[in-house]
Amino acid sequence: MKIYGPNHSNINPYQNQKHIPKQETKQSNRLQPDQLEISDKALKMQQKDSRQTYVNDIKQQVESGDYQVNAQETAKKLLNFWKV
């Protein structure tokens, strides 16, 4: 008595790769030059002056006790983050 595993049929999923025309494989092997694109928002964040002043302002507000956290806005952003 022979016991066959869950894939007892003679289907080989790798046979589909044999039927790819050679022209497509040559095109896919061509290397594309690397490209880097930086968004406008990222460029603005890289500007140290504006970012540093923003961070310093928040630090001063936290130290003086004037910084207020908007709990509803924070909760909305957390929910949006986890929904995606």
Image: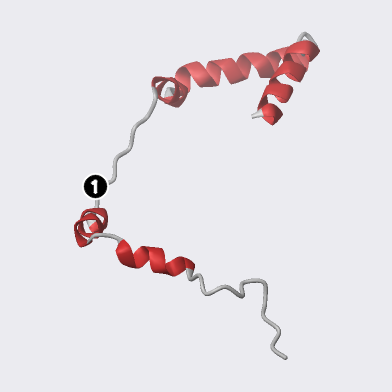
Quadrant containing the N terminus is bottom right
- The location of residue 50, given as percent across then percent down, is 48, 16
Residue 18 left/right relative to 32: right
- The relative height of residue 12 versus residue 74 in the rendered view (above or below) is below
Residue at 52 percent of width and 20 percent of height: 51
- The relative height of residue 54 versus residue 8 in the rendered view (above or below) is above
- Asked if one can make out residue 40 in the rendered structure from this viewpoint, the answer is yes
Residue at 29 percent of width and 60 percent of height: 20
Closer-to-camera residue (7/23): 7
Residue 13 left/right relative to 66: left
Closer-to-camera residue (46/77): 77
- The location of residue 31, given as percent across then percent down, is 24, 53
| Res 81 quadrant in image | top right
Colour scheme: secondary structure
Residue at 67 percent of width and 72 percent of height: 6
Q: Amino acid at mark 1?
A: Pro
Q: Answer few, some or many: residues within 10 Å of disc 1's Cα (few below 14, many 20 plus, some between 14 and 19).
A: few
- The relative height of residue 14 versus residue 83 in the rendered view (above or below) is below
Farthest-out residue, front = 1
- Asked if one can make out residue 70 in the rendered structure from this viewpoint, the answer is no
Q: Which residue is mark 1?
A: 33
- The location of residue 80, given as percent across then percent down, is 68, 22
Quadrant containing the C terminus is top right
